[in-house]
Image (spheres, rainbow, N blue to C red):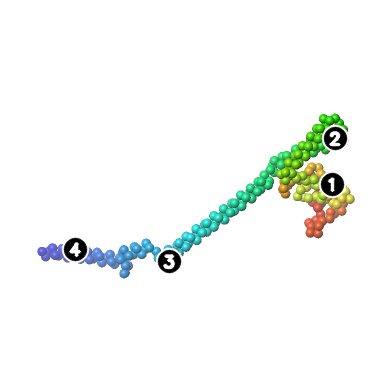
């Protein structure tokens, strides 16, 4: 009987010793269960700060996405307008030689050919003349304009000087001869006019605000 009591006493001591070791491992005043709960649940202030940071990040991403979408819309609209305004430039350049040949054909007619000759010839000339007029009218509908600067000051933006002509009576840089007409689409040059310009005459008068840029014929 004494040995049984002794065994129970030793078991109780062992259990007590084990419990003391567990209590010593935990922070003072906290049980292991309380420590785990505290680590898993942040304070309300930390939670609010985290939510505010997340909201600010999402707002920044949204603003960036909206700005990028607006920039894309503007680029698309600008490209659409450019295409609508200048999309026919390639075709227009290809048709310029047709207009040139029609004009050469009419200019090559001998003097009096329109009034004289047989009826078939007159009809042929009228037909070519009509074709040129219709072609130029079609150009006009699509804002393709002919540049014929005869008698005007030389313009580097729209003219190409091929040679100079000595003329003391005309202001220097005045276009005296047009070898080939130029064309523009809206405000964009399709082909410069090939011209001959005057030299040796008085300097062309310029508006006061353009005096510093020199005369129109300086670069010819």
Q: Is residue 176 left or right of residue 29?
A: right
Query: Residue shown at 75%/50% (left/top)?
Result: 157
Report crowding for label 2: few under 14, some 14 to 19, many 20 or more residues within 10 A (C-alpha): some
Q: Which mark is residue 176?
A: 1
Counting from the top left corner in percent of width and height, residue 17 is at 23, 66
Residues at circles 1 and 2 in contact by the CB criterion of under 8 Å: no
Tell me the distance, in whole angstroms, between the alpha carbons under discs 3 and 4: 48 Å
Kind of element beneath mark 2: loop
Q: Which mark is residue 11?
A: 4
Counting from the top left corner in percent of width and height, residue 64 is at 55, 56
Counting from the top left corner in percent of width and height, residue 220 is at 80, 49
Counting from the top left corner in percent of width and height, residue 202 is at 87, 53
Above or below, 42 against 87 in this view is below
N-terminal of the pair, mark 2 or mark 4, is: 4
Tell me the distance, in whole angstroms, between the alpha carbons under discs 2 and 4: 138 Å
The residue nearer to you, when weighing 135 against 212, is 135
Q: Is residue 202 left or right of residue 142?
A: right
Q: Which mark is residue 45?
A: 3
Residues at circles 1 and 3 in contact by the CB criterion of under 8 Å: no
In this view, the mark in front (2 or 3) = 2
Q: Which mark is residue 114?
A: 2
In this view, the mark in front (1 or 2) = 2
Query: Residue shown at 73%/39% (left/top)?
Result: 95
Q: Is residue 175 left or right of residue 1?
A: right
Kind of element beneath mark 4: helix
In the picture as drawn, the residue positioned furthest to the left comes out as: 1
Residue 100 is at least partly visible in this image: no
Residues at circles 2 and 3 in contact by the CB criterion of under 8 Å: no
N-terminal of the pair, mark 3 or mark 4, is: 4
N-terminal of the pair, mark 4 or mark 1, is: 4
Above or below, 199 against 209 in this view is above
């Amino acid at each position: 009987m004494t040995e049984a009591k002794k065994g129970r006493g030793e078991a109780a001591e062992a259990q007590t010793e084990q419990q003391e070791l567990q209590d010593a491992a935990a922070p003072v005043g906290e049980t292991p269960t309380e420590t785990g709960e505290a680590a898993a649940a942040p304070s309300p202030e930390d939670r609010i700060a985290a939510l505010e940071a997340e909201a600010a990040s999402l707002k920044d991403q949204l603003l960036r996405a909206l700005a990028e979408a607006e920039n894309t819309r503007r680029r698309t609209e600008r490209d659409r307008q450019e295409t609508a305004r200048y999309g026919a430039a390639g075709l227009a350049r290809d048709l310029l030689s047709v207009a040139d040949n029609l004009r050469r054909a009419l200019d090559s007619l001998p003097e009096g050919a329109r009034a004289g000759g047989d009826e078939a010839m007159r009809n042929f000339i009228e037909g070519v003349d009509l074709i040129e007029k219709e072609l130029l009218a079609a150009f006009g509908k699509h804002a393709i304009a002919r540049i014929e600067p005869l008698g005007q000051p030389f313009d580097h933006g729209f003219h190409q000087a091929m040679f100079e002509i000595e003329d003391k009576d005309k202001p220097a840089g005045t276009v005296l001869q047009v070898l080939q007409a130029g064309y523009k689409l809206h405000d964009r040059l399709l082909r410069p006019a090939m011209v001959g310009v005057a030299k040796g005459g008085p300097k062309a008068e310029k508006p006061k605000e353009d005096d510093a840029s020199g005369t129109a014929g300086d670069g010819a």
